[in-house]
Image (cartoon, rainbow, N blue to C red):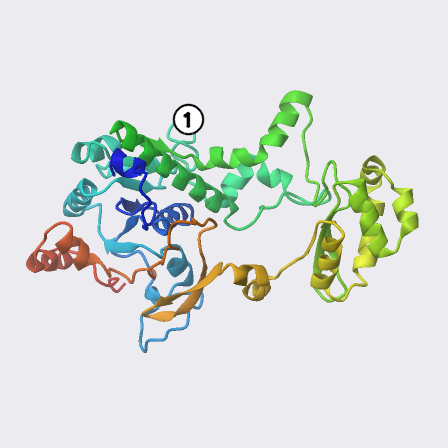
Amino acid sequence: MTGERLNDPKPRREAPLAGVRIIDLTVAIAGPVATQLLADLGADVIRIEPPFPRPLHVDIAPARSDAAGAPSYNRIVSYNDLQRGKRAITLDLARPAGRDLLLRLVETSDVVVENMSPRVLPSLGLAYAELRAHRPDIILVSMPAFGATGPLRDRVSYGPGIDAMSGLSHLTGYPDRGPMQPANYYCDYNAGALAAFATIAALRHRARTGGGQHVECAMLEGELQCVGEALMDYAMNNRTRHRAGNAHPTMSPHGVYPAAADDRWLAIACETDAQWRSLCDVMREPALAARYADVVSRVRARDLVDAAVSVWTSTQDDAVATAAALQAVGVPAAAVNRISDLFDEPQLRARSYLRSASHPEAEAMPFTRPAFAFTSLPQTSSRPAPKYGEHNTEILRNLLGLTEEEIATLAADRVIAHEPPSR
C-alpha cells in the first residue's frame, strides 16, 4: 500500500483495506477476531493452518450439512464463524520447505498477524528480523498474552487467565459471591479489536514513512484499560473497589429487574431526579418519589429502592412494552433480550446487522456484520470460511508460481495437506 493510495482525495467505491494482504498465523479466538475484522474491511487474509489442525470428528454437534457426506471438520460452527472472509492454506512451518514457502508468501504480503507465545516464531526461524529480510517493510503484529518482555513473557493463557490477572474478574459479580468472568471471550474480542486497530495504524505509518515495524499488543495490557477507573481510585484515594453487582456509584435505581414472565427482565437506570420522578409516575408511586427525592438519598437506600422497583416490574407482563413506556417519558430502560430474541429485534433487522453466510458444506449460518458502516463505501460481502486446504493450489500456483507437480510433491511429503490425515 502506498502513501498516494491512502491520501488519494478521489472517492473510491472499494473497501478501505482493498489491496492489503495479511498472513494470518493466529490461533484460538483473539487472533482470528483481529484478522476477521481486517478481512471485513477488505484485506486479503490468508490463514496458515498446520496440516492437521481440525478434528476429524467434532465432539460438539457441528452445523447441519446441506451436502451429503460432507466431512465434519468443515462444519465446525466456531471455526466457520471466526474464519469467515479469509482464504486458507495448510502449511507445516516446522518443516524447512513449509518455512520457506511461508517466507515466500511474506514477500507478497503487507502484514503478518500472530498470537502465540513470544518464543514460537523465533523457534521456527520466523522472527521479525527474518521476516524483514524477505520483506523490508513488513508489519508483524503480535498478540502475546502478557507481552514480549517481563517474567511472564513465555506464559500462555486463555481469556479467563487475562480476566483474572487484570483485576476485571475481581470487579465482576455480586458482593456476596466470588469473582466471575465478565463474559465468555470478553478478553478475546477486546484484544482482537485493539490488534486490528493497531494494524491499521501501522499501515498508515508505513504509507507515510515507508517503514514497517513489529507491533506488540499484549492482551493483559489491553484488558487493563477496562479497569482504569478502579486503578485511579486506588492510586488517588487508596480505595480498593469490590464487586457491586449492577449497582452504580452515582445512579439509583440502576439494575436489571424481573418482569412477570419467567426469565424476562427489565434494565432501568435513573441518572437524574427528573427521571426518577417519571419512573414513579409510571409506577403510580408518588410517595416513593417523595421519600427518595434526590440521588444521594436513593444511593444510600439503594437496596430499598431496588426492592420497590422489583415489586412493580414483577407485575409487568410485557417487558418490551414496559420499556417503551418508560422510554417515552425519558427513563432509560430496555427489555433484556435473550439470544433467540435478537433475530427478531426490530432495530437489528432494520439495519441488516445479522446476516446469513452460505457454506458449500454446511447450512447457512448467521453472522454479525462489522459494527461500523461507511456512507460512501459498499458493505463488505464476506466469503464463507474456507474448507480445509481449500486454497492450497490457488495460492501456491497463482501467488508463488508452483507447478502442479511441485504441489503434489509437497502433499506427498506432508508439507501441505488437502484433508486432515487419519489418526
Q: Where is residue 402 in the image (x, y as percent from the top left)?
A: 9, 53
Q: In this view, does 40 lie to the left or right of 258?
A: left
Disc 1 marks which amino acid?
Answer: Gly
Query: Is residue 416 at all visible to an observer of this figure?
Result: no
Quadrant of residue 119 within the rendered picture: top left
Q: Residue furthest right?
A: 287
**Residue found 81% across the figure and 51% down from its top:** 279
253 or 88, which is in the foreground?
253
Q: Where is residue 375 in the image (x, y as percent from the top left)?
A: 43, 49
- Residue 412 vertical position relative to residue 8 in the rendered view, above or below: below
130 or 251, which is in the foreground?
251
108 or 208, which is in the foreground?
208
Task: Give SS at disc 1.
Answer: loop
423 or 188, which is in the foreground?
188
Q: Is residue 368 left or right of residue 280?
A: left
Q: Is residue 181 left or right of residue 360?
A: right
Quadrant of residue 291 within the rendered picture: top right
Q: Name the image quarter holding the C terminus.
A: bottom left
Q: Which residue lies furthest to the bottom in this view?
A: 68
- Determine which residue is flagged by label 1: 150
Query: Is residue 352 at all visible to an observer of this figure?
Result: yes
**Residue found 36% across the figure and 75% down from its top:** 66
- Dot 1 alpha-carbon crowd within 10 angstroms: few under 14, some 14 to 19, many 20 or more: few
Q: Name the image quarter holding the N terminus.
A: top left
Q: Position of residue 336 (x, y in %)?
A: 66, 58
Q: Is residue 155 left or right of residue 126?
A: right
Q: Residue furthest top?
A: 236
Q: How many marks overall?
A: 1
